[in-house]
Amino acid sequence: MVRFAHDDAGYRDWLVKHPGGYVINTYMNPSPSYLKLHHVSCTSISRLQRGAKTFTDGEYSKVCGGRAELEAYARQLGGAAEPCPLCL
């Protein structure tokens, strides 16, 4: 599991190298109130959204890894990894 904050190049490289992986989109300071779980192929975390200039700067960071370890990470934060309705 790896967290990307202020590292778009590292994040994009991880996506390419882990096509079966998962990503939690969360705030820059991870919070149990927002832990959205996505598959690497989801366009909402693999393509910049309208108005966005980066993936891992500003308001959001990404936590990447296997699904089970990301779900465990979310529980450790006191929350739950909410599945993305587009990809999961």
Image (cartoon, helix red, strand yellow):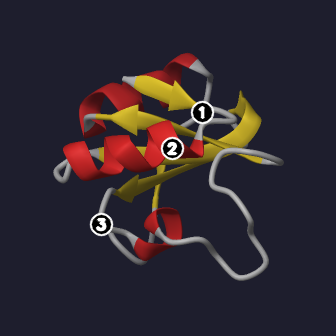
**Amino acid at the residue labelled 1:** Gly
**Amino acid at the residue labelled 2:** Ala
Query: Could you tell which of marks 3 and 1 lies nearer the N-terminus?
Result: 3
Q: Under tag 3, what secondary structure?
A: loop
Q: Are marks 2 and 3 in contact (CB under 8 Å)?
A: no
Q: Residues within 10 Å of mark 1 (few under 14, many from 20)?
A: some
9 relative to 53 in the view: left or right: left
Residue 74 appears anywhere in the view: yes
33 relative to 19 in the view: left or right: right
Q: Residues within 10 Å of mark 3 (few under 14, many from 20)?
A: some
Q: Residue furthest front?
A: 9
Q: Residue 74: x percent and y percent?
A: 51, 30
Real-space Cα distance between discs 3 and 1?
A: 24 Å
Count the labels in the image: 3
Real-space Cα distance between discs 1 and 2?
A: 28 Å
Q: Which residue bears the numbered disc 3?
A: 41
Real-space Cα distance between discs 2 and 3?
A: 17 Å
Q: Residue at x 27, y 52 (%)?
A: 16
Q: Which residue bears the numbered disc 2?
A: 9
68 relative to 32 in the view: left or right: left
Q: Is residue 77 above or below residue 83?
A: above
Closer mark to the observer between disc 3 and disc 1? 3
Q: Under tag 1, what secondary structure?
A: loop
Residue 81 appears anywhere in the view: no
**Amino acid at the residue labelled 3:** Ser
Q: Which residue bears the numbered disc 1?
A: 79
Q: Quadrant of the C terminus?
A: bottom left
